[in-house]
Image (cartoon, rainbow, N blue to C red):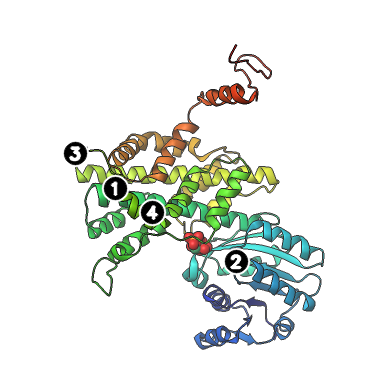
Amino acid sequence: MLNTIGVIGLGVMGGNLALNMADKGEHVGVYNYTSDLTDQLMEKLEGQTIRPFYNIEAFVQSLEKPRKIFLMVTAGRAIDEVIASLTPFLEEGDIIMDGGNSHYEDTERRYDELQGKGIRYLGIGISGGADGARTGPSIMPGGDREAYEQVASILTKIAAQVDGTPCCAYMGPRGAGHFVKMVHNGIEYADMQLITEAYTFLKDRLGLSVEDIADIFESWNQGELKSYLIEITADILRKKDDVTGLPLIDVILDKAGQKGTGKWTSIQAIDHGIPNSIITESLFARYLSSLKEERMNAETILSLPEIELQELDKEVWIEHIRQALYMGKICAYAQGFTQYKMTSEQYGWNLPLKDIALIFRGGCIIRAEFLNIISEAYEENYSLTNLLISPYFAEKTKEYQRNMRKVVCEGIQSGLSFPSLGASLTYYDSYRTGTSNASMIQAQRDYFGAHTYERNDIEGSFHTNWQE
Ligand code: 6PG
Protein backbone atom coordinates (compact mmCIF):
# COMPACT_ATOMS: atom_id res chain seq x y z
CA MET A 1 0.00 0.00 0.00
CA LEU A 2 1.51 3.30 -1.08
CA ASN A 3 1.42 6.25 1.27
CA THR A 4 -1.22 8.91 0.55
CA ILE A 5 0.93 11.82 1.77
CA GLY A 6 4.51 12.43 2.89
CA VAL A 7 5.87 14.78 5.55
CA ILE A 8 9.47 16.03 5.56
CA GLY A 9 10.70 17.78 8.70
CA LEU A 10 9.72 16.06 11.95
CA GLY A 11 10.24 18.80 14.50
CA VAL A 12 7.38 19.52 16.88
CA MET A 13 5.12 21.00 14.18
CA GLY A 14 5.94 18.45 11.47
CA GLY A 15 5.68 15.46 13.77
CA ASN A 16 2.35 16.64 15.16
CA LEU A 17 0.98 17.29 11.67
CA ALA A 18 1.98 13.75 10.62
CA LEU A 19 0.18 12.31 13.66
CA ASN A 20 -2.86 14.49 12.92
CA MET A 21 -2.95 13.29 9.29
CA ALA A 22 -2.63 9.65 10.37
CA ASP A 23 -5.37 10.10 12.98
CA LYS A 24 -7.62 11.21 10.13
CA GLY A 25 -6.92 8.00 8.18
CA GLU A 26 -4.05 9.04 5.93
CA HIS A 27 -1.17 6.66 5.24
CA VAL A 28 1.74 8.92 6.03
CA GLY A 29 5.34 8.52 4.92
CA VAL A 30 7.78 10.53 7.05
CA TYR A 31 11.38 11.59 6.54
CA ASN A 32 13.77 13.82 8.48
CA TYR A 33 17.30 14.85 7.53
CA THR A 34 18.51 13.37 10.82
CA SER A 35 17.06 10.02 11.87
CA ASP A 36 16.70 10.91 15.57
CA LEU A 37 13.49 12.88 15.04
CA THR A 38 12.10 10.11 12.86
CA ASP A 39 12.78 7.55 15.57
CA GLN A 40 11.30 9.82 18.27
CA LEU A 41 8.09 10.18 16.24
CA MET A 42 7.80 6.44 15.68
CA GLU A 43 8.01 5.91 19.45
CA LYS A 44 4.90 8.11 19.89
CA LEU A 45 2.67 6.05 17.59
CA GLU A 46 -0.53 4.67 19.01
CA GLY A 47 -1.66 2.64 16.01
CA GLN A 48 -1.41 5.44 13.46
CA THR A 49 -0.34 4.40 9.93
CA ILE A 50 2.98 6.20 9.70
CA ARG A 51 5.97 4.68 7.90
CA PRO A 52 9.49 6.03 8.48
CA PHE A 53 12.05 6.46 5.70
CA TYR A 54 15.75 7.17 6.12
CA ASN A 55 16.42 7.77 2.44
CA ILE A 56 14.66 10.53 0.52
CA GLU A 57 14.38 8.50 -2.70
CA ALA A 58 12.67 5.62 -0.91
CA PHE A 59 10.43 8.19 0.80
CA VAL A 60 9.37 9.62 -2.60
CA GLN A 61 8.86 6.18 -4.17
CA SER A 62 6.56 5.21 -1.28
CA LEU A 63 3.98 7.87 -2.26
CA GLU A 64 0.98 7.35 -4.52
CA LYS A 65 0.86 9.64 -7.58
CA PRO A 66 0.47 12.52 -7.94
CA ARG A 67 2.79 12.62 -4.95
CA LYS A 68 1.81 15.01 -2.13
CA ILE A 69 4.78 16.12 -0.04
CA PHE A 70 4.38 18.43 2.96
CA LEU A 71 7.51 20.34 4.01
CA MET A 72 7.72 21.39 7.63
CA VAL A 73 11.31 22.65 7.70
CA THR A 74 12.74 25.96 8.91
CA ALA A 75 11.91 28.84 6.58
CA GLY A 76 14.74 30.05 4.40
CA ARG A 77 17.57 28.17 2.66
CA ALA A 78 16.60 24.83 4.18
CA ILE A 79 13.42 24.81 2.09
CA ASP A 80 15.40 25.33 -1.12
CA GLU A 81 17.83 22.57 -0.12
CA VAL A 82 15.03 20.09 0.55
CA ILE A 83 13.32 20.97 -2.74
CA ALA A 84 16.62 20.46 -4.58
CA SER A 85 17.03 17.02 -2.95
CA LEU A 86 13.46 16.06 -3.90
CA THR A 87 13.11 17.23 -7.51
CA PRO A 88 15.36 14.56 -9.10
CA PHE A 89 12.85 11.92 -7.96
CA LEU A 90 9.62 13.79 -8.71
CA GLU A 91 7.47 13.60 -11.83
CA GLU A 92 5.20 16.08 -13.59
CA GLY A 93 2.07 16.75 -11.58
CA ASP A 94 3.59 15.97 -8.19
CA ILE A 95 2.78 18.48 -5.45
CA ILE A 96 5.11 20.10 -2.91
CA MET A 97 3.50 21.99 0.00
CA ASP A 98 5.52 24.34 2.23
CA GLY A 99 3.83 24.63 5.64
CA GLY A 100 6.53 26.76 7.26
CA ASN A 101 6.54 30.50 7.96
CA SER A 102 8.14 31.29 4.61
CA HIS A 103 8.16 34.82 3.27
CA TYR A 104 5.53 35.01 0.53
CA GLU A 105 8.06 36.40 -1.96
CA ASP A 106 10.26 33.32 -1.42
CA THR A 107 7.18 31.20 -2.02
CA GLU A 108 6.48 32.99 -5.29
CA ARG A 109 10.07 32.37 -6.45
CA ARG A 110 9.80 28.64 -5.62
CA TYR A 111 6.38 28.45 -7.23
CA ASP A 112 7.74 29.87 -10.49
CA GLU A 113 10.85 27.64 -10.44
CA LEU A 114 8.86 24.45 -9.86
CA GLN A 115 6.01 25.28 -12.22
CA GLY A 116 8.66 25.41 -14.91
CA LYS A 117 9.43 21.76 -14.11
CA GLY A 118 5.78 20.71 -14.08
CA ILE A 119 5.83 20.35 -10.32
CA ARG A 120 2.98 22.07 -8.51
CA TYR A 121 3.60 24.18 -5.42
CA LEU A 122 1.48 25.37 -2.52
CA GLY A 123 2.64 27.86 0.12
CA ILE A 124 0.54 27.04 3.17
CA GLY A 125 0.27 29.24 6.26
CA ILE A 126 -0.32 27.17 9.37
CA SER A 127 -1.25 28.73 12.68
CA GLY A 128 -1.83 27.27 16.10
CA GLY A 129 1.56 26.17 17.30
CA ALA A 130 2.35 22.62 18.38
CA ASP A 131 -1.10 21.96 19.87
CA GLY A 132 -2.78 23.28 16.76
CA ALA A 133 -0.69 21.08 14.49
CA ARG A 134 -1.65 18.03 16.56
CA THR A 135 -5.36 18.65 17.02
CA GLY A 136 -6.37 21.17 14.36
CA PRO A 137 -4.64 24.32 13.12
CA SER A 138 -5.95 27.10 10.96
CA ILE A 139 -4.67 26.41 7.45
CA MET A 140 -4.10 29.10 4.79
CA PRO A 141 -3.15 27.43 1.46
CA GLY A 142 -2.19 29.45 -1.59
CA GLY A 143 -0.65 28.64 -4.96
CA ASP A 144 -1.63 26.17 -7.69
CA ARG A 145 -5.42 25.92 -7.51
CA GLU A 146 -5.64 22.49 -9.12
CA ALA A 147 -3.06 21.18 -6.67
CA TYR A 148 -5.14 22.60 -3.84
CA GLU A 149 -8.20 20.74 -5.06
CA GLN A 150 -6.18 17.50 -4.91
CA VAL A 151 -5.06 18.02 -1.31
CA ALA A 152 -8.13 19.85 0.00
CA SER A 153 -9.70 16.71 1.45
CA ILE A 154 -6.60 16.11 3.60
CA LEU A 155 -6.09 19.75 4.64
CA THR A 156 -9.72 20.33 5.55
CA LYS A 157 -9.94 17.24 7.73
CA ILE A 158 -6.75 17.98 9.71
CA ALA A 159 -7.76 21.63 10.22
CA ALA A 160 -9.61 22.95 13.26
CA GLN A 161 -13.39 22.72 12.85
CA VAL A 162 -15.78 25.48 13.93
CA ASP A 163 -19.56 24.90 13.64
CA GLY A 164 -18.75 21.96 11.38
CA THR A 165 -16.71 24.15 9.04
CA PRO A 166 -12.98 23.49 8.55
CA CYS A 167 -10.63 26.39 9.34
CA CYS A 168 -9.03 25.93 5.93
CA ALA A 169 -9.88 27.63 2.63
CA TYR A 170 -8.00 28.42 -0.57
CA MET A 171 -6.48 31.88 -0.20
CA GLY A 172 -5.37 32.67 -3.72
CA PRO A 173 -2.56 32.33 -6.25
CA ARG A 174 1.18 31.99 -5.76
CA GLY A 175 2.26 33.48 -2.41
CA ALA A 176 -1.22 34.42 -1.19
CA GLY A 177 -1.35 31.75 1.51
CA HIS A 178 1.94 32.73 3.12
CA PHE A 179 0.96 36.40 2.81
CA VAL A 180 -2.24 35.75 4.75
CA LYS A 181 -0.23 33.95 7.45
CA MET A 182 2.30 36.81 7.60
CA VAL A 183 -0.40 39.42 8.26
CA HIS A 184 -2.06 37.01 10.72
CA ASN A 185 1.18 37.21 12.67
CA GLY A 186 1.24 41.00 12.39
CA ILE A 187 -2.27 41.12 13.86
CA GLU A 188 -1.07 38.68 16.54
CA TYR A 189 1.69 41.10 17.52
CA ALA A 190 -0.85 43.92 17.85
CA ASP A 191 -3.26 41.73 19.83
CA MET A 192 -0.50 40.68 22.23
CA GLN A 193 0.73 44.25 22.72
CA LEU A 194 -2.78 45.61 23.35
CA ILE A 195 -3.32 42.92 26.01
CA THR A 196 0.03 43.83 27.57
CA GLU A 197 -0.99 47.50 27.75
CA ALA A 198 -4.31 46.63 29.39
CA TYR A 199 -2.37 44.46 31.87
CA THR A 200 -0.02 47.41 32.46
CA PHE A 201 -2.88 49.75 33.43
CA LEU A 202 -4.46 47.14 35.71
CA LYS A 203 -1.15 46.39 37.43
CA ASP A 204 0.72 49.70 37.41
CA ARG A 205 -2.09 52.27 37.63
CA LEU A 206 -4.81 50.40 39.51
CA GLY A 207 -2.29 48.48 41.60
CA LEU A 208 -4.13 45.18 41.24
CA SER A 209 -2.47 41.89 42.15
CA VAL A 210 -1.49 39.35 39.51
CA GLU A 211 -4.16 37.00 40.90
CA ASP A 212 -6.87 39.68 40.68
CA ILE A 213 -5.83 40.51 37.11
CA ALA A 214 -6.03 36.82 36.19
CA ASP A 215 -9.64 36.83 37.43
CA ILE A 216 -10.35 39.93 35.35
CA PHE A 217 -8.97 38.38 32.16
CA GLU A 218 -10.88 35.19 32.89
CA SER A 219 -14.11 37.17 33.21
CA TRP A 220 -13.32 39.17 30.05
CA ASN A 221 -12.93 35.85 28.26
CA GLN A 222 -16.62 35.16 28.89
CA GLY A 223 -17.70 38.19 26.86
CA GLU A 224 -16.93 39.96 23.58
CA LEU A 225 -13.16 39.70 24.19
CA LYS A 226 -13.41 35.87 24.19
CA SER A 227 -10.23 34.66 22.46
CA TYR A 228 -7.24 32.36 22.78
CA LEU A 229 -4.85 35.18 23.71
CA ILE A 230 -7.15 36.47 26.49
CA GLU A 231 -7.60 32.91 27.76
CA ILE A 232 -3.86 32.15 27.91
CA THR A 233 -3.18 35.53 29.56
CA ALA A 234 -5.34 34.48 32.51
CA ASP A 235 -3.47 31.14 32.63
CA ILE A 236 -0.09 32.90 32.44
CA LEU A 237 -1.00 35.16 35.37
CA ARG A 238 -1.96 32.19 37.52
CA LYS A 239 1.29 30.30 36.91
CA LYS A 240 3.70 30.21 39.87
CA ASP A 241 7.48 30.00 39.49
CA ASP A 242 8.84 26.64 40.71
CA VAL A 243 12.05 28.27 41.94
CA THR A 244 10.78 31.27 43.90
CA GLY A 245 7.08 30.54 44.34
CA LEU A 246 6.40 34.02 42.91
CA PRO A 247 4.03 34.58 39.98
CA LEU A 248 6.14 33.34 37.05
CA ILE A 249 5.31 36.48 35.08
CA ASP A 250 7.23 38.49 37.67
CA VAL A 251 10.50 36.65 37.09
CA ILE A 252 10.48 36.60 33.26
CA LEU A 253 12.99 39.07 31.77
CA ASP A 254 11.14 41.93 30.03
CA LYS A 255 12.92 41.65 26.65
CA ALA A 256 10.48 40.53 23.92
CA GLY A 257 11.76 38.38 21.06
CA GLN A 258 10.44 38.01 17.51
CA LYS A 259 11.18 35.68 14.63
CA GLY A 260 10.41 38.11 11.82
CA THR A 261 6.87 37.64 10.57
CA GLY A 262 5.62 40.81 12.29
CA LYS A 263 8.55 42.74 10.85
CA TRP A 264 7.75 41.45 7.35
CA THR A 265 4.15 42.61 7.82
CA SER A 266 5.32 46.16 8.61
CA ILE A 267 7.86 46.24 5.77
CA GLN A 268 5.27 45.08 3.26
CA ALA A 269 2.78 47.71 4.48
CA ILE A 270 5.39 50.47 4.20
CA ASP A 271 6.46 49.27 0.74
CA HIS A 272 2.85 49.29 -0.44
CA GLY A 273 1.60 52.52 1.16
CA ILE A 274 -0.63 50.77 3.66
CA PRO A 275 -1.07 52.36 7.12
CA ASN A 276 -0.58 49.62 9.72
CA SER A 277 0.63 51.75 12.61
CA ILE A 278 -0.71 49.53 15.41
CA ILE A 279 1.06 46.41 14.13
CA THR A 280 4.24 48.40 13.57
CA GLU A 281 4.10 50.08 16.98
CA SER A 282 3.70 46.60 18.49
CA LEU A 283 6.85 45.51 16.67
CA PHE A 284 8.75 48.62 17.81
CA ALA A 285 7.59 47.96 21.38
CA ARG A 286 9.38 44.60 21.17
CA TYR A 287 12.51 46.30 19.80
CA LEU A 288 12.43 48.94 22.55
CA SER A 289 11.96 46.25 25.20
CA SER A 290 15.19 44.64 24.00
CA LEU A 291 17.12 47.79 24.95
CA LYS A 292 16.98 46.64 28.57
CA GLU A 293 20.35 47.99 29.68
CA GLU A 294 19.69 51.38 28.07
CA ARG A 295 16.26 51.55 29.70
CA MET A 296 17.72 50.69 33.11
CA ASN A 297 20.16 53.57 32.73
CA ALA A 298 17.59 56.01 31.33
CA GLU A 299 15.33 55.28 34.28
CA THR A 300 17.90 56.88 36.59
CA ILE A 301 17.96 60.04 34.47
CA LEU A 302 14.46 60.56 33.07
CA SER A 303 11.42 60.76 35.33
CA LEU A 304 7.80 61.81 35.44
CA PRO A 305 6.95 65.36 36.53
CA GLU A 306 5.60 65.64 40.04
CA ILE A 307 1.90 64.92 39.60
CA GLU A 308 -0.69 63.79 42.10
CA LEU A 309 -2.33 60.63 40.76
CA GLN A 310 -6.02 60.49 41.65
CA GLU A 311 -7.45 57.42 43.36
CA LEU A 312 -9.44 55.61 40.65
CA ASP A 313 -12.57 53.55 41.22
CA LYS A 314 -11.28 50.08 40.37
CA GLU A 315 -14.56 48.55 39.20
CA VAL A 316 -15.36 51.52 36.97
CA TRP A 317 -11.87 51.57 35.42
CA ILE A 318 -11.71 47.81 34.88
CA GLU A 319 -14.70 48.23 32.55
CA HIS A 320 -13.09 51.29 30.94
CA ILE A 321 -10.01 49.19 30.20
CA ARG A 322 -12.07 46.33 28.81
CA GLN A 323 -13.73 48.74 26.39
CA ALA A 324 -10.39 50.31 25.47
CA LEU A 325 -8.89 46.87 24.80
CA TYR A 326 -11.82 45.80 22.62
CA MET A 327 -11.73 49.06 20.65
CA GLY A 328 -7.97 48.71 20.20
CA LYS A 329 -8.52 45.17 18.92
CA ILE A 330 -11.14 46.44 16.45
CA CYS A 331 -8.72 49.08 15.13
CA ALA A 332 -5.86 46.56 14.86
CA TYR A 333 -7.96 44.04 12.93
CA ALA A 334 -9.29 46.87 10.75
CA GLN A 335 -5.67 47.65 9.82
CA GLY A 336 -4.81 43.99 9.25
CA PHE A 337 -7.79 43.38 6.98
CA THR A 338 -7.12 46.64 5.17
CA GLN A 339 -3.64 45.31 4.47
CA TYR A 340 -5.28 42.18 3.03
CA LYS A 341 -7.67 44.26 0.90
CA MET A 342 -5.16 46.81 -0.42
CA THR A 343 -2.54 44.16 -1.21
CA SER A 344 -5.12 41.93 -2.85
CA GLU A 345 -6.11 44.80 -5.15
CA GLN A 346 -2.48 45.67 -5.91
CA TYR A 347 -1.58 42.03 -6.71
CA GLY A 348 -4.88 41.03 -8.28
CA TRP A 349 -5.19 38.13 -5.81
CA ASN A 350 -8.87 38.58 -4.93
CA LEU A 351 -8.21 37.49 -1.32
CA PRO A 352 -11.40 36.08 0.25
CA LEU A 353 -11.68 38.45 3.24
CA LYS A 354 -14.79 36.75 4.60
CA ASP A 355 -13.16 33.30 4.38
CA ILE A 356 -9.98 34.62 6.03
CA ALA A 357 -12.05 35.73 9.02
CA LEU A 358 -13.91 32.41 9.03
CA ILE A 359 -10.77 30.26 9.07
CA PHE A 360 -9.31 32.46 11.84
CA ARG A 361 -12.21 31.51 14.14
CA GLY A 362 -10.45 28.34 15.23
CA GLY A 363 -7.03 26.75 15.45
CA CYS A 364 -4.91 29.88 15.01
CA ILE A 365 -3.26 32.07 17.63
CA ILE A 366 -5.63 35.01 17.00
CA ARG A 367 -8.78 32.85 17.13
CA ALA A 368 -11.50 34.94 18.72
CA GLU A 369 -15.28 35.21 19.01
CA PHE A 370 -15.34 38.51 17.18
CA LEU A 371 -13.99 37.00 13.98
CA ASN A 372 -17.58 35.84 13.41
CA ILE A 373 -18.56 39.52 13.38
CA ILE A 374 -15.75 40.34 10.95
CA SER A 375 -16.82 37.59 8.56
CA GLU A 376 -20.43 38.82 8.78
CA ALA A 377 -19.26 42.35 7.94
CA TYR A 378 -17.71 41.07 4.69
CA GLU A 379 -20.74 38.85 4.06
CA GLU A 380 -22.94 41.96 4.18
CA ASN A 381 -20.56 44.09 2.12
CA TYR A 382 -17.93 42.26 0.07
CA SER A 383 -16.25 45.50 -0.99
CA LEU A 384 -16.17 47.04 2.51
CA THR A 385 -13.27 49.52 2.46
CA ASN A 386 -12.55 49.35 6.19
CA LEU A 387 -14.05 47.35 9.07
CA LEU A 388 -14.36 50.54 11.13
CA ILE A 389 -17.24 51.78 8.96
CA SER A 390 -19.22 48.51 9.02
CA PRO A 391 -22.46 49.05 11.01
CA TYR A 392 -21.49 46.90 14.00
CA PHE A 393 -17.96 48.28 14.45
CA ALA A 394 -19.03 51.87 13.73
CA GLU A 395 -21.61 51.58 16.49
CA LYS A 396 -19.27 49.76 18.89
CA THR A 397 -16.43 52.27 18.50
CA LYS A 398 -18.87 55.17 18.85
CA GLU A 399 -19.97 53.64 22.18
CA TYR A 400 -16.52 52.63 23.49
CA GLN A 401 -14.37 55.53 22.36
CA ARG A 402 -15.28 57.73 25.36
CA ASN A 403 -13.79 55.26 27.83
CA MET A 404 -10.89 54.39 25.55
CA ARG A 405 -9.96 58.09 25.52
CA LYS A 406 -10.12 58.13 29.31
CA VAL A 407 -7.83 55.10 29.56
CA VAL A 408 -5.29 56.42 27.02
CA CYS A 409 -5.24 59.91 28.58
CA GLU A 410 -5.01 58.63 32.14
CA GLY A 411 -2.36 56.08 31.17
CA ILE A 412 -0.21 58.65 29.38
CA GLN A 413 -0.76 61.21 32.15
CA SER A 414 0.47 58.55 34.59
CA GLY A 415 3.58 57.86 32.51
CA LEU A 416 2.54 54.43 31.21
CA SER A 417 3.82 53.26 27.81
CA PHE A 418 0.84 52.84 25.42
CA PRO A 419 2.30 52.44 21.92
CA SER A 420 -0.56 50.33 20.60
CA LEU A 421 -3.56 51.66 22.50
CA GLY A 422 -2.32 55.14 21.59
CA ALA A 423 -1.80 54.17 17.96
CA SER A 424 -5.27 52.60 17.86
CA LEU A 425 -7.00 55.76 19.04
CA THR A 426 -4.91 57.95 16.73
CA TYR A 427 -5.69 55.68 13.79
CA TYR A 428 -9.41 55.87 14.60
CA ASP A 429 -9.33 59.68 14.85
CA SER A 430 -7.21 60.08 11.71
CA TYR A 431 -9.40 57.74 9.67
CA ARG A 432 -12.64 59.50 10.68
CA THR A 433 -11.25 63.00 9.91
CA GLY A 434 -12.51 64.09 6.47
CA THR A 435 -10.50 67.33 6.37
CA SER A 436 -7.08 66.93 7.93
CA ASN A 437 -4.05 69.17 8.26
CA ALA A 438 -1.91 67.29 5.75
CA SER A 439 -2.17 70.59 3.85
CA MET A 440 0.59 71.85 6.16
CA ILE A 441 2.87 69.01 4.98
CA GLN A 442 2.18 69.97 1.37
CA ALA A 443 2.90 73.64 2.09
CA GLN A 444 6.20 72.83 3.82
CA ARG A 445 7.26 70.46 0.99
CA ASP A 446 6.48 73.15 -1.58
CA TYR A 447 8.21 75.85 0.48
CA PHE A 448 11.57 74.09 0.79
CA GLY A 449 11.45 71.71 -2.20
CA ALA A 450 9.04 73.27 -4.71
CA HIS A 451 7.30 69.89 -4.75
CA THR A 452 3.99 71.61 -5.71
CA TYR A 453 0.56 71.03 -4.20
CA GLU A 454 -3.04 70.63 -5.29
CA ARG A 455 -5.83 72.98 -4.16
CA ASN A 456 -9.17 71.94 -2.67
CA ASP A 457 -11.06 74.40 -4.87
CA ILE A 458 -9.29 74.53 -8.25
CA GLU A 459 -8.00 71.63 -10.39
CA GLY A 460 -4.29 71.53 -11.14
CA SER A 461 -0.85 71.50 -9.58
CA PHE A 462 0.55 74.65 -7.97
CA HIS A 463 3.78 76.09 -6.63
CA THR A 464 4.12 79.26 -4.55
CA ASN A 465 7.19 81.43 -4.06
CA TRP A 466 6.65 81.49 -0.31
CA GLN A 467 9.26 84.10 0.45
CA GLU A 468 7.93 86.76 -1.97
C1 6PG B 1 1.32 30.78 14.88
C2 6PG B 1 2.47 31.60 15.47
C3 6PG B 1 3.80 31.14 14.95
C4 6PG B 1 4.94 32.12 15.28
C5 6PG B 1 5.37 32.08 16.73
C6 6PG B 1 6.60 32.96 16.97
O1 6PG B 1 0.50 31.39 14.15
O2 6PG B 1 1.27 29.58 15.18
O3 6PG B 1 2.28 32.96 15.04
O4 6PG B 1 3.73 31.06 13.54
O5 6PG B 1 6.06 31.77 14.57
O6 6PG B 1 4.32 32.56 17.47
O7 6PG B 1 6.38 34.25 16.46
P1 6PG B 1 7.30 35.49 16.96
O8 6PG B 1 8.59 34.90 17.48
O9 6PG B 1 7.53 36.32 15.73
O10 6PG B 1 6.53 36.18 18.04
Q: Is residue 212 left or right of residue 196?
A: left
Which of the two marks, 3 or 4, is nearer to us in this view? 4
Label whose residue precedes the other's in the sequence (3 or 1): 1
Label whose residue precedes the other's in the sequence (2 or 3): 2
Name the quadrant containing residue 2: bottom right
Q: Amino acid at mark 2?
A: Gly
Label whose residue precedes the other's in the sequence (3 or 4): 4
Which residue is labeled 3 in the image?
A: 310
Which of the two marks, 4 or 2, is nearer to us in this view? 4
Label whose residue precedes the other's in the sequence (4 or 2): 2
Which of the two marks, 1 or 2, is nearer to us in this view? 1
Classify the position of the N terminus by image quarter.
bottom right
Q: Amino acid at mark 1?
A: Phe
Q: Residue furthest top?
A: 468
- Say which of 199 and 90 sits in front: 199
Is residue 384 at all visible to an observer of this figure? yes
**Image: 458 above or below 80:** above
Label whose residue precedes the other's in the sequence (1 or 4): 1
Residue 294's disc is 4
- Name the residue located 80 percent from the left edge and 74 percent from the top edge: 91
Q: How dense is the environment of label 3, judged by Cα within 10 Å: few (below 14), some, or many (20 and up)?
A: few
Distance of mark 3 from mark 1, alpha carbons?
14 Å
Label whose residue precedes the other's in the sequence (1 or 2): 2
Q: Is residue 364 left or right of residue 323?
A: right
